[in-house]
Image (cartoon, rainbow, N blue to C red):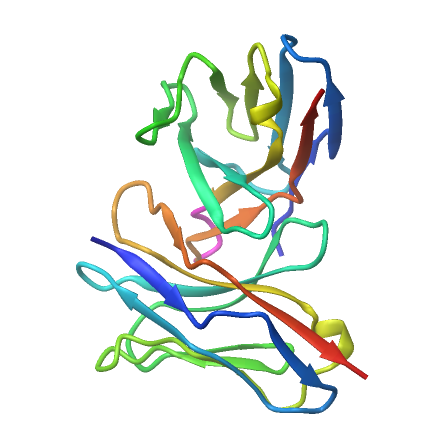
Amino acid sequence: GAVVSQHPSRVICKSGTSVKIECRSLDFQATTMFWYRQFPKQSLMLMATSNEGSKATYEQGVEKDKFLINHASLTLSTLTVTSAHPEDSSFYICSARDYGRGTDTQYFGPGTRLTVL
Amino acid sequence: GNSVTQMEGPVTLSEEAFLTINCTYTATGYPSLFWYVQYPGEGLQLLLKATKADDKGSNKGFEATYRKETTSFHLEKGSVQVSDSAVYFCALTLKTSYDKVIFGPGTSLSVIP
């Protein structure tokens, strides 16, 4: 099946610093990618929809200036958590939408665990 | 609004027991339905899907049938293994331009030897 990677898998940073998380579709082009956040023992919450070459669409309640999303190519989307604080600690998961090969399916990355000290 | 409801967990079963995890949905139009599995510390993996009424998705011994009349997509497996221990998410997507995935709350399954 299609593969989506995320980097890094884990990151620990100090409060006030910025952290960038990459999401890559490895064997297909993805015009649309999604960023989710998951708190312990909870479901995934959609943060934003990332479209290649245009601005991301953020869900209600998600601060666009804090969670910067860039989808510069058909295989890469980045999420930057700016001026991170402990409450931003979470598991961040991206997904990429695969239209091709007779399918329309979202494939999820393995997730990035962010810990802000 | 559009939503997915799952049976509450955690569910604990003995190895080789029969598994059912109930899932019902509310949606405008005709959604596609999915089951995703999340193993401890990992991201989500697509387990199976169905895109229209009466379709049956199956994979790795798991099955689910898209029941439009009951708006359900229950997950079943005839004989669970310890390696099936994970969290299972029922989800849907709508036929919109972005196809956002709407997840259920997840059901934790523990299979004991």
| Residue A107 percent location from the top left of the image | 54, 49
Query: Which quadrant holds residue B68?
Result: bottom left
Q: Name the image quarter holding the C terminus of chain B.
A: bottom right
Image mark count: 0
Vertical relation: B108 (above or below) A10:
below
Magenta region, residue range = A98-102
Vertical relation: B20 (above or below) A82:
below
Q: Residue at x 51, y 29 (%)?
A: A74
| Residue A112 percent location from the top left of the image | 67, 35
Q: Residue at x 67, y 29 (%)?
A: A114
| Residue B45 percent location from the top left of the image | 60, 57
Left or right position of A22 against A61: right
Q: Can residue A43 be found in the magenta stretch?
A: no
Q: Residue at x 21, y 82 (%)?
A: B69
Predominant secondary structure in magenta? Answer: loop
Vertical relation: B36 (above or below) B111:
above
| Residue B55 percent location from the top left of the image | 37, 79
